[in-house]
Image: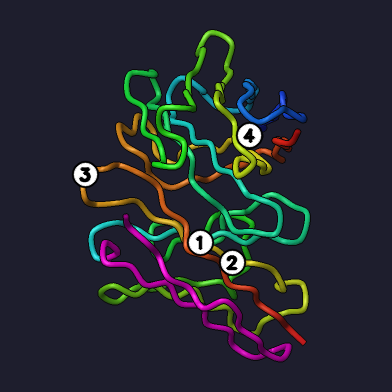
Amino acid sequence: QVQLVESGGGVVQPGGSLRLSCAASGFTFSSYGMHWVRQAPGKGLEWVAFIRYDGSNKYYADSVKGRFTISRDNSKNTLYLQMNSLRAEDTAVYYCAKDSKLWQLLPSGLDYWGQGTLVTVSS
Amino acid sequence: SYELTQPPSVSVSPGQTARITCSGDALPKKYPYWYQQKSGQAPVLVIYEDSKRPSGIPERFSGSSSGTMATLTISGAQVEDEADYYCYSTDSSGNHRGVFGGGTKLTVL
């Protein structure tokens, strides 16, 4: 069965950096695009970023573009989110999610989600 | 930027039909997806590509679309269906971004 396990969350000061990881299993990781989605405390879901199955194309929400970088290591079945210049408004639970379509070049729907990791940006 | 609009809340009694709408200009071109999120849990896909139901999702969940409006219907809502529901789609403008609606709190009591 598909499993996605996020890690790397924690407390960081404004302006700091953090790298999240998402370990994937139960499917052919290198054949699917992957997403990051976040949810601020008490708020709705916000799509953050998508990376193509082979890592060659990446797309970002305006709110994180230029500060966050999505990447993947298909040899390790792992997705990453490097977060720099963090702000208080980046405080959220961060979920990784699998795209629903095989060999998809662009973001599509999300079919499986991890349990999330909490990032708190505070001094 | 592209937006999907949902009502903040919907309330029904057990056994009644709940309908949650989602409007967006790109919905005629891009499939909507629907997610259920119960308190403290990760979202779960309940409807994909407009009207398809993943395995394990009860038949009372269905989806439909007409023009710029998508609708999630829960026929005979149960107390355990009480949750937040989000529609999702992608931008058709060439920005290639995902977008979630603001979410709808479904109350069944």
Q: Are marks 2 and 4 on the same chain?
A: no
Q: Name the residue under label 1.
A: B34
Residue B101 lies left or right of residue A77; in this view the side is left
Q: Marks 4/1: CA distance?
A: 19 Å
Contact flag, marks 2 and 1 (Cβ < 8 Å): yes
**Among the two numbered marks 3 and 2 on one chain, the one whose residue lies closer to the N terminus:** 2
Subunit bearing disc 2 = B
Residue A101 in which image quadrant: top left
Q: Do labels 1 and 3 share a chain?
A: yes
Q: Main secondary structure of the magenta part?
A: loop
Residue span colored magenta: B1-27
Q: Are marks 3 and 4 on the same chain?
A: no
The x and y percentages for residue A67 are 47, 27
Q: Marks 3/2: CA distance?
A: 27 Å
Q: Name the residue under label 2.
A: B85
Q: Which mark lies nearer to you, 4 or 1?
A: 1
Contact flag, marks 3 and 4 (Cβ < 8 Å): no
Q: Mark 3 points at which residue?
A: B94
Q: Marks 1/3: CA distance?
A: 22 Å
Q: Which mark lies nearer to you, 3 or 4?
A: 3
User: Which quarter of the image is occupied by the C terminus of chain A?
Assistant: top right
Residue A117, above or below A41: above
Name the residue type under label 1. Trp
User: Which quarter of the image is occupied by the N terminus of chain A?
Assistant: top right
